[in-house]
Amino acid sequence: MATNRTFTMLKPDSLEKGNTGAILEKINAAGFKIVAMKQTQMSQVDAEAFYAVHNERPFFGELVEYMTRGPIIAAILEKENAVEDFRTLIGATNPEEAAEGTIRKLYAASIGENAVHGSDSDENAAIEGAFHFSGRDIF
Ligand code: GDP
C-alpha cells in the first residue's frame, strides 16, 4: 500500500554551497509537507549501511566519502504519490540528463555530487526514514 511519504537528504554539497533554503522552497512549493527534519552528519558506518546496495559499484568509496564529508539535512516528506512526484521534482541522477527546472538540474554539479537524495520506492522510503528518525520525531 502506498504510504504517501518519501525520504530525502540535502547532501553535503547543498549545505556547502548555501543552496538549502532554495531547495526547501522548491520542495514546499511542489506541495510536500515536512513531517520530520534535522541537520546531521553521517559517519562512515552510517553511509556504508545506507548505501549498502551500491557496495560493489566502482564509485562506492567516492560516494561514502562525499556523503560523510559534511552535514546533511534529512527529512521525511508527505504528499499524495510522494515517491514518484519527488523523483520527478529532483530529476535524473546525472544533472546533465535532468529535466529543466528540476532540483538536480539547478543545483547538482555532477552525477556523483548531485545535491539531493530521493527514495526510489515506498518500501525504501520507510526503511530510509527509519534509518534517520525515531517515531517520536515524525509528525
Ligand atoms: P539516485 O537514486 O538517483 O540517487 O541514484 P542511484 O541510487 O543510482 O545512486 C545513488 C547515489 O550514488 C547517486 O545519487 C550519486 O550520488 C551516486 N552515484 C551514482 N552513480 C554514480 C557514478 O557513476 N559516479 C559517482 N561518483 N557517484 C555516483
Image (cartoon, grey):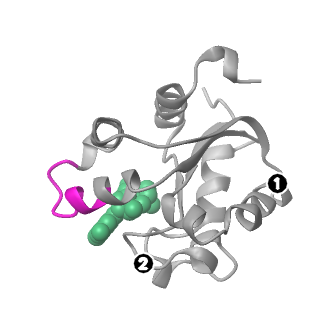
- Image height check: is 36 above or below 82? above
- Residue ID at (83%, 52%): 31
Query: Separation of disc 1 and disc 2 at Cα?
Result: 24 Å
Neighbor class of circle 1 (other Cα within 10 Å; few <14, some 14-19, many 20+) is few
- Residue 48 position in % (x across, y down): 27, 41
Residue to which mark 1 is pinned: 28
Q: Nearer the viewer, residue 2 or 74?
A: 74
Residue to which mark 2 is pinned: 110
**Is residue 56 within the magenta segment?**
yes
Q: What stretch is highlighted in magenta?
A: 55-63
On-image quarter of the C terminus: top right
111 vs 57, left or right, is right
- Residue 86 position in % (x across, y down): 65, 54
- Residue ID at (53%, 36%): 125
**Is residue 109 within the magenta segment?**
no
- Image height check: is 122 above or below 118? above
- Residue 78 sits in quarter: top right
- The amino acid on which the numbered mark 1 sits, given as a three-letter code, is Asn
Q: Earlier in the sequence, mark 1 or mark 2?
A: 1
Q: Is mark 2 on a helix, strand or loop?
A: loop
- Residue 9 position in % (x across, y down): 55, 49
- Residue ID at (47%, 43%): 41
Q: Do the residues labelled 1 and 2 touch (CB within 8 Å)?
A: no
